[in-house]
Amino acid sequence: MTVEESDLVLVKRVQRGDKSAFDLLVRKYQHKVVKLVLRYVRNPAEAEDIAQEAFIKAYRALPQFRGDSAFYTWMYRIAINTAKNSLASRDRSPIAYDLDLNDPEESHSVQTKLQDPDTPEGMALTEEIRGIVNSAIEGLPEELKTAIVLRELDGLSYEEIAAAMECPVGTVRSRIFRAREAIDKRLREVFEGGLGRTEEMV
Amino acid sequence: MTEERDSQLSAMFDGELPGAECELLARRLSRDEALRAQWSRFSMIGAALRAERGVALHDRVSQRVQTAIAKEAAYGDGADTGATSSQPVPATPVSVKTASNARWARLMRPVAGASIAAGVAALSIMWMRTDVGGPDPMLASTSAEASAAESIVLTPEAAPSTLASNTPGASRAPSNGEPDVYVTPAPSTSPGIAPPARLANYVVAHSEYSGPLSRRMALLGLVAADSENATPEQAGSAQANDNADAATGAADAP
């Protein structure tokens, strides 16, 4: 099974009424979509807003998705169109300065701006997570590190990694899982120990 | 057990899990928030490794999207919902248009079903026509019955010759405005369904004076007599019998 087919399983579940399956797709691709939108807008908070809008549009259009292309390819186009439309409408619309903080939408927008990843707090949080992940990777045995890097950075399939590392595909699967598990364990420890206090401060 | 499941989760995230297992795990994911959180952290690990910006804060996107779509109607029959299906449905949906569309779709479902059934029936009829290679067999049959009935009443001896053209052997011959083929059952050799031209004429001739009961008795008697004296020519077609019945019915009418 490929990534496309795996995503299609989730897409079909959404089409049958399982909203949580769409949540999995969002969680999986939100970073990529935000990264993509950041090519069009400089403000990360605005990029998040556009990404959110793109995902909602995708959800509404999902009944028409037939799986002719990969879900992410389809999502990619929606995100780009949403970003372009947002830029066009922003050029036409005046900027509203009189925000109503009692309005949940607007107050959320203000909060988002305060939590802008480019703010010192946001950047610190991102750096903290990166530091944890990188230090966890450094502590991994060489074969686990190689496997996870080939997968996440080079985007190789298990079969390609197996060929590169001269081991069975099952071993690759196990190595990638163990690498993730070790990093995840470290992340959970830090999360429970106080990662994200920046948001609470805000 | 948990390790195997987590290993499956990792493989599914990479699109490397076999389809059947993927479906099962997706079902489990729909009701296991801890597993979904792990899925989310796998995504975060990848983003951190690729040094993407705002790794931590981007998780808010999924939370905001989840909140937004919780207000929308679920697709399908909503039966395949997972953990999020327990989220409260707002009194006023964000997208009225979407909710309205969903209602409209539910209302139109039986109509669509009936349309499909009608379409299938039409296709079947067209297929039958194509299969026969001629005009509508129903019409042809009706036309044959009508002409046969007329010939029986007016000229009894004409009936066999008219019906003879309905035999499969004659059906492919070119015709002068007549249907190329009549779809009729193969001629039966059973003497019980011999063309009762004599019977029909008798019934029509006496229907004005006889009562229904006596007519039926006469009919039975003649059928019995015919079946004893039936010849192959008389056993030519079931249609004549049908016409006789039709004639009897007409005579029965007040």
Image: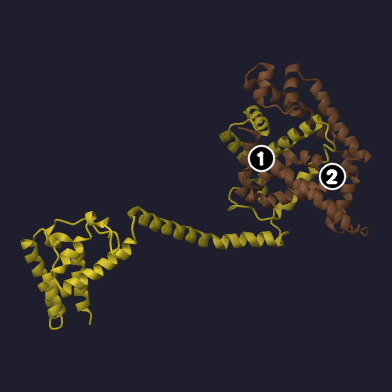
Q: Secondary structure at mark 2?
A: loop
Quadrant in the picture for residue A195:
top right
Residue closer to the observer: A87 or B166? B166
Judged left or right of residue B1, residue B45 is right
Chain of the residue under the numbered disc 1 shown in the image: A
Q: Residue at x 54, y 59 (%)?
A: B109
Q: Secondary structure at mark 1?
A: loop
Chain of the residue under the numbered disc 2 shown in the image: A
Q: Which chain is yellow?
A: B
Q: Is residue B63 visible?
A: no
Quadrant in the picture for residue B45:
top right
- Residue B142, given in percent of the width and then of the height, sits at 28, 67
Specify the label residue A40 is tagged with. 2
Judged left or right of residue B150, residue A147 is right
* Three-letter code, disc 2: Tyr
Tell me the CA gap for discs 2 and 1: 23 Å
Question: Pointer 1: what residue?
Answer: A70
